Amino acid sequence: MKVKKILREIDLIKKDYRQLSKELKNHALLRSKKNSYTKEDKESFLILWKKYIDLFSKLKKLIWFSWYRKYFFFIHYNKLVLRKFLLVFYFNSILEIEGIFGEHKSFIRVLLDENFKKDYGYFAKYIYRPRFVTTINTPNIFITPFQRYMDSKIYKLLISGEIEVNNKNRLSANYNNLFFYFKYRFDKLLFIVSEKVSYLISITRFSFRTKGLITKKNIDKYLKIAQPWDIFLTRWNWNASNISIPWFWKHMSLYVWKWSFLKKNFSSDFISDLDSKTHYVIEATWDGIKVVDIEKFISHNDYLGVSRTTFTKEKIYRSIWNSFEHIWKWYDYIFNFYSDKKLVCSELVMKSYTSEFKGDVWFDIQLENIWTSLVYPPNSFVSMILNEQNKKKSLLEPIFFIDSIEKTGENFVSTSEEFLESRKRSRLSLFLK
C-alpha cells in the first residue's frame, strides 16, 4: 500500500471520527436523564455504535499493515511512524469516547456488551498488547535522526503533536478497562453461584405454614374493580428472602387479566396455552419470567397492594407488548437494572412501562445500590405512589390493599392510606404486628 493511499485513508478515518464524535456528543441518550433511557434512543445509539465498530476495524487493518520490521535490525521508519500515529489516535479516541459517556458509562457498557458481545473497553484492550505499548512509548528523539529515510508527509505526522499520549490518562484507562475485564468474568461466575443460592433462599421458610394468608374472598373483591396491567406489590412472611431484600415489600408483578382479553387484543404463542376463564399475573421469579394464574399467585402471599397508572389505553397496550417480549427470560441473579437480557421482578414492571420515544410518559425512578448491585427495590414503589399524589397530575393511584395480621392469621381489606404507610413496616416477620 503506497504512502499517499495510506495518508488518504487516515484523513478519511479522521474525518469520519470527527463526524461520529459530533453525533455522539449530541445523541439524545447521553443528554437524557440518567436511568430514563427511551427504547428509541437505545436503538439509535446501537446503530451509531455500529459505525464506531466499523471505524475501529479500519484502524486495526491499517495498524496490521504498518508492521515496520523486515529483519531484526531493519526498521521501516515510514511504517514505524504510521503505526505510532495510528495507535495514539486509536487510544485517544477511546479516551475521548469514555469522557463523552460520562455518568452513562456503566449503562452503556452493559448495553453494548449485551448487543455486540463486547463493550467499548474491548476495543481499548486491543492496543494494550506489549508490542503496541512499546511502539507508543518509543520517544520521537529516537526516530527524528532518520528523517532522510522517511517520506516528508510521514515526517510531518511525527512532529505534528498528534503522536503523543498522556501517560496519566493511559494509566487510568488501563486500570478502568482491566477492572471491567475481571468484573465481567466475575459476574458470570457470580451468576452461576447466585442462581443456586437464590433458589435455596427462595424455598427456605421459617414457618410450618404452607399457604399465604390472602383469602379467595378478598381477592374476588379486588377482581371486581381490576383493570389490565394493575401493578401488584406482594409479601409472604417468614421467607428467607425477606432478610436479604430490604424493607417491607418484597415482590412486584403485573396483573394481566383473562385469556379472552389477551386473545382479542394480542397475538403471541404462549397465549393459546392459557385457560379462557382464569385471571393471570406476569412475574419474574427464580425460575424465570412467566405468566401464572392468580390463584397460584395468591397462594403464597400474605399481603397485596395494588396501584394503577393513569396512562392512556394505547400506552398500557404498548406496555403489555413490552412485557411479553421478556417471557421466559432468565431471572437476574446479580441484580443489574441496566441489563435487558435478565430481569428481576421490579425490572419487569418498570421496563414494561418504559419510555419508548421522546415525550413518552414514564416513571421517574431512582436506582439504589444494594449488595454492590444497582436495583429498584419494590418498597420504593410505594414511596413513588406517595410522591405522585403530591403532583397536579398523578401517574399512579393506590387502588386496593389486602392487609394481614400475622399473629392471628387475619386477612382483610384495608385503606389506601394504610397501604402507603406500609412502606415503614419492618422487613422481618418477627417484628410485624
Image: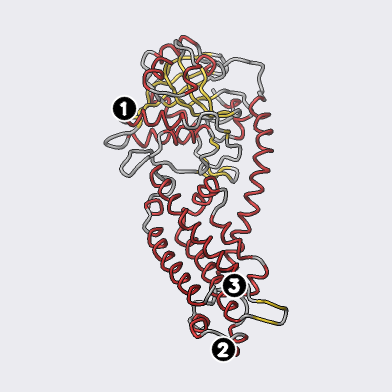
Marks 3 and 1: which is nearer the front? 3
Identify whether 173 is placed above or below 49. Answer: below
Gap between marks 3 and 1 measured at Cα: 60 Å
Q: Position of residue 284 (x, y in %)?
A: 54, 29
**Quadrant in which the C terminus is drawn:** top right
Residue 328 shown left or right of residue 196 in the figure: left
The residue lying at 32 percent from left, 40 percent from top is 360
Q: Sort mark 2 into few (<14), some (14-19) or many (20+) by Cα contacts within 10 Å.
A: some
Tell which of 359 and 158 is nearer to you.
158
Amino acid type, label 1 = Lys
Gap between marks 2 and 3 measured at Cα: 18 Å
> Which is more N-terminal, label 3 or label 2?
3
Instruction: Determine which residue is flagged by label 3.
Output: 66
> Which is more N-terminal, label 1 or label 3?
3
> Which is more N-terminal, label 1 or label 2?
2
Amino acid type, label 3 = Ser
Gap between marks 2 and 1 measured at Cα: 72 Å
Q: Secondary structure at mark 1?
A: helix
The residue lying at 49 percent from left, 51 percent from top is 108
Q: Position of residue 104 (x, y in %)?
A: 46, 53
| Residue positioned most to the left | 392
Instruction: Determine which residue is flagged by label 2.
Output: 147
Which corner quadrant of the image does residue 125 belong to?
A: bottom right
Tell which of 230 and 20 is nearer to you.
20
